[in-house]
Amino acid sequence: MKVVFICGGASKRMYPLTQGKYFLNLLGKPLLHHQIIVAQKAGLNHFVIVGNPGNIKRIEEITSSLSSITVETAIQQKPLGIANALEAARQYLDDEIIVVNPNDIFYETAYTTLLLEKSLDSAESYLLGYKVDRYFPGGYLVVEDGDYLKSIVEEPQKGSQASDMVSVLVHMHTNPQKLLEYVAKIETGSQSGYERTLENMIKDGQRIKVLPLPGLWNTIKYPWHILEVTRRFFTQFERYVASTAKISDRAIVKGKVIISDRVEVMENAVVHGPAYIGPGTTIGTHCLVTDNSHIGANCDLGYATMIENSYIGDNNKFLMNYIGDSIIGENCKFGAGTKTANYYTDGGSVKVRIGENEFDTGRDRFGAITGNNCRFGINSTIMPGVKIAPGSVIASHTCVKRDVGEKELV
């Protein structure tokens, strides 16, 4: 049995964050690393990873650090969907496979559920679905008697969902060569090519069984999902303070925290877990880090900075700032007094523009999303849901109410 990770996508919905979602650092390790460990817990050690020309070296670096696994890599030249990714990996799909989107977060029971059902049943393929209680922009599964798939409705309009079960891309195919025969019959340049492949298999009498995903499910489809996934990872670790960390006797570090190597927590600072502090980061005097905050490596939290329920990348500098419910890229510098607003006074849900469309985050508290290498002058303010593209500069005393383009001066 091989696990096929699909990592060739462009992650356009995540802009202004530009790194692949599977490279997102969580508790000191990239998400792809965590996903491999989950599969290993289910007894799966053979992986096929489909990347793209820009990320394949990073994928190889991550997998080379893991022992007791076999990895084969393939390159998808353009982000043309799952079917095209399987075509790119055709030479390695010579055994039963489980096709996985590594942006979906689940427990190892997802794998063991598929493996157990396969031992009891004789379907050609097995899919996992997750019941949702509100609209999610994904593929909805329509199931017939006996839990067999009838059709997939891909990203219907809100209010017109065909069912309450969303497809989770943890799909087992017992005959990958047959799957590839169907893939070859369609135009794989479409993002929905894989779904149409499954539809054609059903029309020809192939049996595809749908199983409920056991446990919780999270996915990273839009930037604000990072906060939900981070919160989930915080439930899975034990308190740890590195021996090389320096914590002042006058600082307060309490709760479930990870304090990494060479971290310094200075006088009168408070770190209130759950929280993660990356290697080499300094938490300055009178700073507060709280409420599921994840702070990357080599950051400098200057005097009186508060970071709350936020994901902070590496090499960022702060001074007397408030960063709430926000996602900050890497190598950004915040001038003294700059703040992120994270709440509308009417209490309404925060909306974010993705491309030409506006999306409801479903959150009444959500701050800014900044790309890498941004600069903020003193006393600037970023309103809820605003995106700041990489390399942008926000002048002092500016209130940013709209999305900012790449390398733009506001």
Image (cartoon, rainbow, N blue to C red):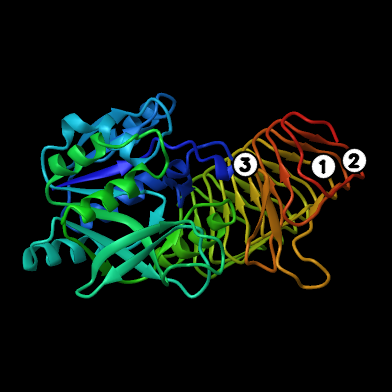
The x and y percentages for residue 29 are 41, 46
Q: 155 and 55: which one is in front?
A: 155
Q: On screen, 328 above or below 409?
A: below
Q: Earlier in the sequence, mark 3 or mark 1?
A: 3
Element type at mark 2: loop
Which quadrant of the rendered structure holds the C terminus?
top right
Image quarter of residue 108: bottom left
Q: Please give the residue where the numbered disc 1 appears in the rendered image.
A: 335
Left or right of 43 on screen, residue 266: right
Left or right of 331 on screen, residue 190: left
Q: Crowding near pointer 2: few (<14 within 10 Å), some, many (20+)? A: some
Three-letter residue code for mark 1? Gly
Spatial CA distance of label 2 from label 1 is 8 Å
User: Which of the two marks, 3 or 1, is nearer to us in this view?
Assistant: 3
Residue at x-position 45% and y-position 52%: 27
Image quarter of residue 250: bottom right
Q: Please give the residue where the numbered disc 3 appears in the rendered image.
A: 329
Q: Are marks 2 and 1 in contact (CB under 8 Å)?
A: yes
Q: On screen, 334 above or below 92?
A: below
The x and y percentages for residue 326 are 67, 54
Element type at mark 3: loop
Three-letter residue code for mark 3? Gly
Q: On screen, 311 above or below 9?
A: below
Residue at x-position 34% and y-position 31%: 61
Element type at mark 1: loop
Q: Please give the residue where the numbered disc 2 appears in the rendered image.
A: 396
Q: 303 and 125: which one is in front?
A: 125
The x and y percentages for residue 303 are 77, 51
Residue at x-position 45% and y-position 47%: 28
